[in-house]
Amino acid sequence: MKVSVIIRNQNENEYIGFAIQSCLDFFDKPEIIVVDNNSTDDSLHTVNLFKDRTTIKIIPINDYTPGKSINLGVKYATEDIILVLSAHSQITKVDLRAIKDDLNRAVAVFGQQIPIYKGKKISKRYIWSHFKEDHTVNMFSKIENRYFLHNAFCFYNRQFLLNNPMPEQYAGKEDRYWAMDIVNKGYNYYYDSTHKINHFYTTNGATWKGIG
């Protein structure tokens, strides 16, 4: 069972190797598609270190938005299952067969995120409080007052994303706008806490509000 992994990158050298290696640990020769937003650090050198282990595609992007980068990655993907994965994350638990089964009933499956600061598992504040030990259909956020889905660790059917692309006009939260749209169209998506990543703190991270 194969998967195409889309990783959005801009100067993520500190962690992107951990993200890619974790994909190799859990998936059989995954197709890694790095959509790169004009990186100036050594992150692409790090990405290229993995070319002897699996298929690596580096796709440059200009006029970056999160949605545009995912849609571009999907166009270059060749596998039926897509994973959108944060460049500063590390998969710690996932069952791809269970994901495939769920994608027969839902259009997306996103997993649990454990916030990590300098190696320390920190308390789940703000959006991290959504990542509980449960299974939820069409998760709704009381904090944000809208449907909640998160593209740091989310699986999709490639064909569905081709037919229902991410909105490209937003500077962030493209996943929430997409979730609202597909629920309004009558589809379901799942949150399954049994699939897990470590999500590492970055100083420019848009979703970190306080560390504890």
Image (cartoon, helix red, strand yellow):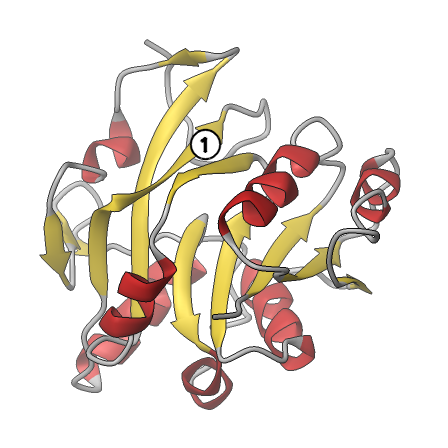
Residue 75 higher or lower than 198, as above or below: below
Residue 194 higher or lower than 62, as above or below: above
Residue 81 higher or lower than 31, as above or below: below
Q: Amino acid at mark 1?
A: His
Report whether 17 appears left or right of 45: left
Give neighbour class at mark 1: few <14, some 14-19, many 20+ (Cα, 10 Å).
many
Residue at the (60%, 60%) spot, across then down? 6
For mark 1, give the secondary structure. strand
Q: Position of residue 180 (x, y in %)?
A: 25, 70
Residue at the (12%, 45%) spot, across then down? 142
Q: Nearer the viewer, residue 204 or 90?
A: 90
Report whether 56 appears left or right of 118: right
Residue 26 higher or lower than 13, as above or below: below
Residue at the (23%, 75%) spot, across then down? 106
Q: Position of residue 119 (x, y in %)?
A: 49, 12
- Give the quarter of the image for residue 61: bottom right
Q: Nearer the viewer, residue 51 or 185?
A: 51
Q: Position of residue 203 (x, y in %)?
A: 58, 22
So how many labels did they put on this image?
Answer: 1
- Give the quarter of the image for residue 67: bottom right
Quarter of the image containing the C terminus?
top left
Q: Which residue is mark 1?
A: 199
The residue at the far bottom in this view is 163
Residue at the (61%, 61%) spot, across then down? 30
Q: Position of residue 121 (x, y in %)?
A: 36, 15
Q: Nearer the viewer, residue 104 or 131?
A: 104
